[in-house]
Amino acid sequence: MFHAAIRPCVRKRSKAASVGGPKHSVKFKEVRLYLVERKMGSSRRSFLTQLARSKGFIVDDHLSDEITHVVSEDSRASSLWAWLKGCGLTNLSKMQVLHISWFTDSMRVGSPAAVENRHLIQDTPPALQEGSAPALAPAPAPAPAASVSQYACQRRTSTDNKNKILTDAFEVLAEYYELSELQSSCLVFRRAASVLKSLPWTVQCIEATQGLPCLGDHTKAIMEEILQSGHSFDVERILSSERYQTLKLFTSMFGVGPKTAEKWYRRGLRSFSDIVAEPSVQLNPMQQSGFLHYGDISRVVTKAEAQALGNIIDQAVRLITSDGVIALTGGFRRGKEVGHDVDFIVTTHEVGKEGCVLRHIIDSFKKQGILLYCDYQASTFHVSKLPCKSFEAMDYYPKCFLILRLEASQVDGGLGCAEGDNRGWRAVRVDLVSPPMDRYAFALLGWTGSTQFDRDLRRFARKERRMILDNHTLYDKTKGRFLTARSEEDIFAHLGLEYVEPWQRNA
Ligand code: UTP
Ligand code: MN
């Protein structure tokens, strides 16, 4: 509950209420903010008030019926709404009651941000309010935390993430550290997110996480902040920082990694138009295509679109060989509804002919006029290179990174694209890899992911079994020999692990 001491009395807004400090010109007359002091604290409130006023917003010190947007740092809906209702407002139903994230978004863009669902602090229906009988069945008892393995390959993780609020925050931090090339800090947050994703229950309080692996003091402090207030100050700060936003934007372009993004950022470039206007920046062919098709390939690919691409590839393979093998891998094999690209293994039973098949498929796409971009990488595979010493290295198989043209007419239910886009086709990112058939199971396991699942499989192999696993092979260091596998099940069995289905690998 709110302290009576901070309960403001509703009064007619006096001119003096919004004056104080330097005068700023008002840019947004139709918007009038009130910042709730509770949780925010008075010094942060006055800082945020000054910030908003400097950007042309009206911020009133007192709550009145003229307020259009109430902004609260405390996202506990029931106590906030109980307080608002006790303030004697007549206009409350017309006010937007918003989480601080709306304010942060608005400051970032320098104008009132469009209100999205995630910004709203909604009034709780009476049935769910404190003191009344619970309308929902009680949550299932948490699985004992102590039984959760530190390795993702010993956990089962479906796409049904019960802790999305926490894992989203951790993923922002992981990404931030990855963009800053601080790999070990990045991994701390990836591992923490991965553990939470595997839980069949929602973490409601920090005590419930006792005994869970991969959650250190730092991650727990952030979780506690989110559980109490609905957000993390560190995460909000990163999300609103110019550096993070710019690096995210640049790396969202096909062919731009953290190093290039950082280089551009250091040169003072902040947008795609800055890049295009900068004469010293030479985009390579991959980046040029990424740029050309940015609108399409930055949009998710749907399952139906992935299926349609599978049919196209299937037809191309049939024309070339009766011995072809095609498998959908990546996130779609793990049961995800959407992806950023579509990954396929495309090969032939004839060992040694893989590269040939892949080149024929590319030719076929070219003839059909659907090849918008192709980066073909020939095989660099040789048994003498095995086992791979470097952990995160790319594999040696022939592969290609493509942008294909996909016609709406080929997709069941049409393209999942933005309304009003009547072109009748979209560009889509497709990766094809062609391992020789005797390596198929290793390639399938590696390309199915998730990246975190694979990482932990390799770590488990190394630390617990003295084995080296990669996309090509499994090497037993104790016995000094390679272990063969015809299926993914064989690989799990060699590692002494229970088999984990693809849809349970969303670590
Ligand atoms: P993706 O990056 O496509 O991830 O790589 P994803 O899980 O499918 O996610 P979305 O849905 O597209 O966003 C798929 C898997 O292929 C492996 C990656 O490590 C990942 O596990 N991979 C990718 C390789 O093993 N080698 C490569 O050269 C590229
Ligand atoms: Mn993918």
Image (cartoon, grey):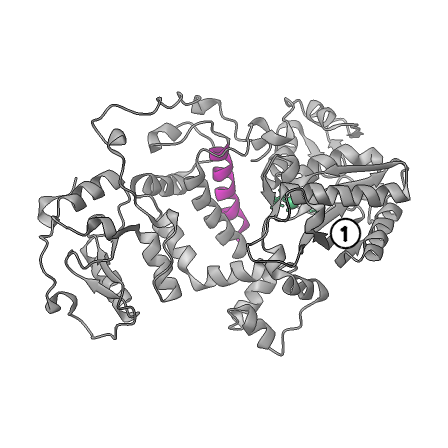
Q: Give how far across and how far down residue 110 sits, in percent.
A: 36, 67
Please check the rendered image and state whether residue 191 is part of the magenta-colored stretch, yes or no: yes
246 on left or right of 496: left
For label 1, the crowd category at 10 Å Cα-Cα, with few meaning under 14, some 14 to 19 and many 20 or more, is many
Q: Is residue 186 something that shows in the picture?
A: yes
Quadrant in the rendering for residue 438: top right
Q: What range of the chain is rendered magenta? A: 182-197
- Taking the spot 51% from the left edge, 42% from the top edge, the residue there is 190
Quadrant in the rendering for residue 19: bottom left
32 on left or right of 170: left
Q: Give how far across and how far down residue 60 sits, in percent.
A: 18, 62
Q: Give how far across and how far down residue 181 sits, in percent.
A: 55, 55
For the residue labelled by badge 1, is the local secondary structure a helix, a strand or a loop?
strand
Q: Give how far across and how far down residue 247 sits, in percent.
A: 52, 61
Quadrant in the rendering for residue 443: top right
- Taking the spot 27% from the left edge, 30% from the top edge, the residue there is 128
**Viewer-closest of 148 and 235:** 235
Q: How many labels, in total?
A: 1
Residue type at the position of mark 1: Cys
Split into quadrants, the picture shows ligand 2 in the one at top right
379 relative to 482, above or below:
below
Quarter of the N terminus within the rendering: top left
Most extreme residue toward the bottom is 279
215 on left or right of 53: right
Mark 1 lies on residue: 400
- Predominant SS of the magenta segment: helix
Quarter of the C terminus within the rendering: top right
